[in-house]
């Protein structure tokens, strides 16, 4: 006993050092954006000195403020609440990694032996999907002023398509990764917004929350740093209507140097037959008034008139938006299906979120959405005003595009992630059988399962998942 005490005094904590323990956390989770030429180049995190010099700032960003954290720190940027629903491509540090980082600071933030430093991952650039069928590029360079202000700009891209095109994917390629914060693309009737470009003295035209016209198609493409782009699952496609122009709405982040951007769009057409089109339902509530010095809640519902499979959703508000919650209630059982919750809405981080598997919602289901808006006085809103629906920075929105297909049996087993695997296919061999049960049983017993082990989607894994998997196989 005494000896133990003695040892603990000498080695208070296992000697955590940068090379062995901290570099893998930072390089795997942060450096893709935090390096030169990227969106977060203001804070490069590519070696010991950079991480050491900024260690308290990093700790603040990854731990979050304790009282307002709700489990969702600032960095890596992932506003969705992971305890509410499981979504694809979540970016986060584990509690263990967060604690390791603060323990490292506490014991002196040592470097350790550089030989143990984690190798810098390779960050591929260019298309994530391979060779596109067609590339459409901005006609001119756009100059982003280095005035440290946000810049929201729409650019018209002519397609020249005189027939509708079936898309497997539309991929936005930022021309300048340091400047482009996010982008979203729609189609409009050819020539219908040319006047807006003509009226603006610079290339493109200014647009904040909208495209300057209401005659727009579904959202066809989008971009946010860190978001992963995929083709629609086999047999699914989105359509670009015939005789359309595309509008690319780009949000340029505040910069202190002048920069040039010439972004482009990669189009991947659907070669095989299209069994189902991906549709968009835009849930909107324009009928609200947000009084000054109050937090208000706005709600909306969508009652389904057919069976659908939900694939993606993008809650959208402006700067007063504070929280979002979206869930569905099933008609027969009133069972609640949580879709997404955002506890600290951030206009800068908007993603088209996908569930891991298509969500089957039968006819009569009701999707409920609510957003709270904080119109009280604070440093960003020192002089609160009555606020209504509108396109400008100081207007607000309640807007959620939901992407879905009409339901086909088995949709709930279609995995929407990168390597198409089926629910329960833990070993990724393309089938579900007793080998997967063995693997699941072993990882449950050793508490070492990955997310795909959560067969019943209850946020964890245990014997219930094993039982369900066996039933799926016996069915
Ligand atoms: C997908 C890109 C991306 C990733 C991944 C990312 N960051 Fe960031 N980070 C940004 C951007 C962009 C900003 C600027 C603020 C903003 O837009 O939210 C930022 C801001 C920060 C800030 C300043 C926060 C503040 O408000 O003061 C810190 C510190 C930071 N990041 C650390 C990290 C760490 C540590 C990681 C990894 C655990 C990480 N970031 C992962 C893009 C990223």
Image (spheres, rainbow, N blue to C red):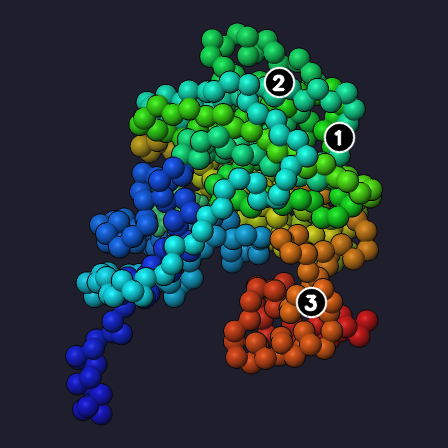
The residue sitting at 37% across, 45% down in the picture is 34
Q: Disc number at residue 275?
A: none
Q: Disc number at residue 213?
A: 2
The residue sitting at 60% across, 36% down in the picture is 171
188 versus 313 height, above or below: above
68 versus 113 height, above or below: above
Task: In this rendered view, identify the residue nearer to me: 382 or 109.
Answer: 109
Q: Is mark 1 within 8 Å of ligand 1?
A: no
Query: Can you give x and y, in whole percent of width and height, for residue 227 in the image?
Result: 53, 44
Task: In this rendered view, identify the residue nearer to me: 466 or 156.
Answer: 156
Tag in front: 3 or 2: 3
The residue labelled by disc 1 is 165
Disc 1 on helix, strand or loop? strand
Q: Does the residue labelled 3 lie within 8 Å of ligand 1?
A: no
Tag in front: 1 or 2: 1
**Distance (Cα) linking label 1 and label 2:** 22 Å
Question: With 469 as the anchor, is 400 left or right in this view?
Answer: left
User: Who comes first in sequence, dot 1 or dot 3?
Assistant: 1
User: Which quadrant is home to the N terminus?
Assistant: bottom left
Is label 1 in contact with label 3 (beta carbons under 8 Å)?
no
Residue 398 location, quadrant: top right
Disc 2 on helix, strand or loop? loop
The residue sitting at 57% across, 49% down in the picture is 340
**Distance (Cα) linking label 3 and label 2:** 48 Å
Task: In this rendered view, identify the residue nearer to me: 474 or 255.
Answer: 255
The residue sitting at 46% across, 20% down in the picture is 142
The residue labelled by disc 3 is 429
User: Who comes first in sequence, dot 3 or dot 2?
Assistant: 2
């Amino acid at each position: 006993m005494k000896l133990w005490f003695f040892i603990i005094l000498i080695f208070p904590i296992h000697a955590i050092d940068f090379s062995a323990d901290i570099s893998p956390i930072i390089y795997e989770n942060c450096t893709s954006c935090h390096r030169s030429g990227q969106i977060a180049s203001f804070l490069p995190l590519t070696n010991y000195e950079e991480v050491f010099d900024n260690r308290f700032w990093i700790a603040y960003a990854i731990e979050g403020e304790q009282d307002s954290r709700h489990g969702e720190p600032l960095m890596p940027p992932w506003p969705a609440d992971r305890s509410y629903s499981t979504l694809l491509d979540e970016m986060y540090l584990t509690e263990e990694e967060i604690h390791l980082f603060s323990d490292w600071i506490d014991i002196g933030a040592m470097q350790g032996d550089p030989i143990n430093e984690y190798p810098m991952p390779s960050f591929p650039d260019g298309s994530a999907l391979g060779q596109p069928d067609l590339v459409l590029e901005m006609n001119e360079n756009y100059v982003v002023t280095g005035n440290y202000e946000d810049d929201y700009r729409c650019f018209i891209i002519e397609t020249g398509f005189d027939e509708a095109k079936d898309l497997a994917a539309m991929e936005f390629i930022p021309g300048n990764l340091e400047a482009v914060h996010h982008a979203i693309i729609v189609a409009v009737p050819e020539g219908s917004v040319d006047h807006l470009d003509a009226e603006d003295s610079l290339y493109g035209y200014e647009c904040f929350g909208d495209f300057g016209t209401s005659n727009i198609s579904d959202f066809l493409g989008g971009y946010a740093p860190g978001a992963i782009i995929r083709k629609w699952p086999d047999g699914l496609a989105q359509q670009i209507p015939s005789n359309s122009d595309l509008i690319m709405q780009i949000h340029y982040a505040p910069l202190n140097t002048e920069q040039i951007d010439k972004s482009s769009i990669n189009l991947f057409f659907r070669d095989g037959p299209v069994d189902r089109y991906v549709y968009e339902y835009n849930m909107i509530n324009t009928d609200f008034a947000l009084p000054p010095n109050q937090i208000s809640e706005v709600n909306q519902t969508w009652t389904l008139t057919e069976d659908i499979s939900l694939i993606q959703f993008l809650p959208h508000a402006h700067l007063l938006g504070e929280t979002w919650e979206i869930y569905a209630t099933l008609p027969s059982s009133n069972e609640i299906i949580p879709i997404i919750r955002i506890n600290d809405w951030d206009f800068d981080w908007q993603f088209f979120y996908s569930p891991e598997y298509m969500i089957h919602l039968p006819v009569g289901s009701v999707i409920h959405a609510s957003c709270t808006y904080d119109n009280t006085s604070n440093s960003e809103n020192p002089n609160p005003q009555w606020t209504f629906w509108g396109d400008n920075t100081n207007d607000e929105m309640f807007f959620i595009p939901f992407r879905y297909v009409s339901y086909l049996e088995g949709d709930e087993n279609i995995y929407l992630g990168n390597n198409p695997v089926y629910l329960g296919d833990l070993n990724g061999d393309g089938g579900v059988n007793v080998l997967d049960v063995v693997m699941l049983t072993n990882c449950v017993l050793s508490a070492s399962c990955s997310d795909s082990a959560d067969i019943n989607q209850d946020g964890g894994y245990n014997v219930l998942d094993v039982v369900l998997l066996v039933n799926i196989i016996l069915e």
